[in-house]
Amino acid sequence: MQNRLIKFTAVVITLFLYSCANMVPPSGGPKDTTPPQPIKMSPLLYTKNFKEKVITIKFNEYIVLKNISDNLIVSPPSEEKPKVKLNGKQLKIILPDSLLPNTTYILNFGNAIADFTEGNILHNFKYIFSTGSQIDSLKISGSVSNAFSLKPEKSIKVLLYPAGKDSAFYNELPRYVTTTDKNGNFEFTNLKAGTYSIYALDDKNKNYRYDMPTEKIGFIDKDISPFAKIKTDTSGKKETVFGPDSIKILTFIEDKNLKNFVAKYKRIMPGKLVIFFNRQSNKKPIINPITQMNFLTSISPHNDTVTIWITDTNATKKDSLVFAVSYYDRDTLHNDTLYFKWFNKKYKLPQLTLKLKGNPKVSPFKPVIISTGIPVKSADTTKIKLFIQKDTAFVPISYKIKDSLENIFIIFDKKEDEKYRLIIDSAAIYSIFGNTNDSTAFNFSVQSKDYYGSLKIKTTKKPANNLIIQLTDKSFKKIIKETTLQLNDTAVTFINLPPNEYGLRIISDKNGDGKWTPGDLSKKILPEPVKYEKGIKIKSSWENELEISLPQ
């Protein structure tokens, strides 16, 4: 009996202790969204005549550091970066020995500091001190955008140098540095009075110098001088205004640094090879096989993509095809040897499949286009018949045919709103691989001309140089039509536009080369101005007009 009582008592005590050890905090309550806050700094914030080697900052909760090497920006920068150590709630910053005299320093932690539990970020926390007897207080601000797309440039370095030394951007550390936010905006604070040159830099190697040809840069063509002035409103209230506060910098990659080279090449199928070049060129590349074979080439309008079709059946069966490629980088001829591999033994040649583009209504302004998917070797017009519907019967009509690699163009006198039938018998079309089509029939009608609209573009004043005007899709990704508004003209019209929403890109072609040209830092030439118009809606039978200001 006594043993049973002892065992029972032991079980009760064990259960009690287990329940105590697994106490769960109460659930519910609002989620912590407050970032950590500094509660103690040594030396104090805004310390003057700073001589310390170590800065200690204590926070009100445990913190973590996120990507401190990229987030922490020290301005002015030095070759030797500070070392940052974390211990619970405390940050310790060990400074380099190379601090400049009589200089205000800013340690901007960006998005590096967050609380341990919820990851709430303390955005752009700054520790500021001066090695001299005063804290500099001037400010400037602005934005950085891509020169061609005009989209904001986030996480781009913005650099300030004392004016008068153009080589400093290439060879020296800046006097001040900051980083753009997600909207491309930047701000410098605690600046010393003076005159500065300002630059933007996509600093790929993180050394604060423009020393890589593929780094995006930006500049303005005049120096800036930070200022502060007192502004009095209508009620008599005074306010200190800093400036300049709307500096606009446009980024680009210098054209002279962009080399032309084979960026990528691949063998899509045994008889189809594609070569992609890094950039457009005004000269066509030259393609030749190392081993003799029959082939066709298709080169894109800007000479940046080459498609090679192998018409030699024996060659398509080889695991490797080798081609010599000669292409120009400006006026210099380069030669590459490209090896195209194929290891898929089960692969079958593609079918010659016919599709009508624009089905079921075709444009009254263009030929009827039949896509084939693979290049055409020949077409037997006796097996291709075109009919127009008259009442309930289809009457044969004459046409002309033209082929262009992967398309067949049917050319005839089209009549609006009439119905047609195109019959292509089997074996009417032969591909370069020797296969033929199946029998196919297409029924289609011709779209009425009233379905289309037009867009007349007028400028508010005569341009000083040619304007390249590109009508695009609404996302500006695809150029639908392009024209040039000649010098001193003020209007241009796009006709035969299907009803849709479009965009417009206007390029001020200052050098007259027919394309957008980026800037040239050594010559202090800014990129050619670009302007965008969005939300242009074209309606059927409407003559739309749009008045635009000139790109600046």
Image (cartoon, rainbow, N blue to C red):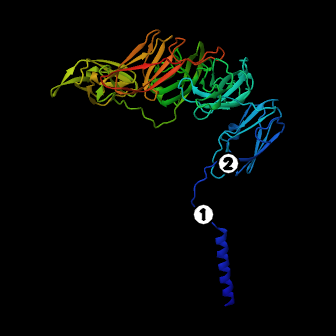
Residue 207 shows up from this direction: no
Q: Which residue is mark 1?
A: 26
The crowding category of the residue bearing disc 2, from other C-alpha atoms within 10 Å (few below 14, some 14 to 19, many at least 20), is many
Binning the other alpha carbons within 10 Å of mark 1 as few (below 14), some (14 to 19) or many (20 upward) gives: few
Q: Residue at point 65% right, 47% down?
A: 35
Q: Position of residue 550 (x, y in %)?
A: 49, 17
- What residue is shown with label 2? 36
- Asked which secondary structure carries label 2, the reply is loop
Type of amino acid under label 1: Pro
Amino acid of disc 2: Pro
* Residue occupying the far front of the picture: 235
Image quadrant where residue 228 sits = top right
Where is residue 265 drawn, in percent x and y? 54, 27
> Rounded to the nearest whole Å, what is the CA distance between mark 1 and mark 2?
23 Å
Q: Nearer the viewer, residue 358 or 88?
A: 88
Report the residue that reaches farthest toward the top: 488
Residue 392, image x, y percentages: 15, 28
